[in-house]
Amino acid sequence: MKKRHKRMGFIVVGLCSLGVAAALVLSAFNRNLVFFFTPSQVAGKEAPLGRHFRIGGLVQKGSLKRDADGLTSRFMIADAAKSIPVVYKGILPDLFKEGRGCVAEGKVAPDGVFYADQVLAKHDENYMPPEVAQTLAGK
């Protein structure tokens, strides 16, 4: 084989490898891509049914209910205009409280209920862990 043919073969193999690598990266990125919606967008049917996404807002005061099993929690996430019922089976974060912000990740059912796989409690920029606050108060 001539040098030119060898070089062309290396270029073709390199381009094919680069294409396969790019396809794998994009595929992994697409599987891990999670969109964020507000309760108003979910109520307006802008969120995809049967697909994972995140919903964020404030936990409505008086809406937190726990089932008899002790793990299933039901609450409402609201923004300024709408509220969405959320069902979560698991242990809620320590910072999770009514009237505070939270982000839930899961799927919305056709009946409009959001079934969360994960709940994250939000805090403001002034948050300080209790241990640190006690240490600072003792000084």
Image (spheres, rainbow, N blue to C red):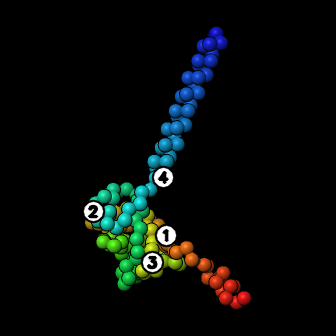
Under mark 1, the amino acid is: Leu
Spatial CA distance of label 4 from label 3 is 27 Å
Under mark 2, the amino acid is: Gly
SS of the residue under disc 4: helix
Q: Quadrant of the N terminus?
A: top right
| Mark 1, residue position | 120
Question: Where is residue 113 drawn, in percent x and y?
Answer: 32, 68
Q: Mark 4 or mark 2: which comes first in sequence?
A: 4
SS of the residue under disc 2: loop
Residue at 42% of width from left, 81% of height from top? Answer: 98
Q: Nearer the viewer, residue 80 or 32?
A: 80
Residue 20 in the image: above or below residue 117: above
Under mark 3, the amino acid is: Arg
Q: Quadrant of the C terminus?
A: bottom right
| Mark 2, residue position | 44
Spatial CA distance of label 3 from label 2 is 23 Å
Q: Mark 1 or mark 2: which comes first in sequence?
A: 2
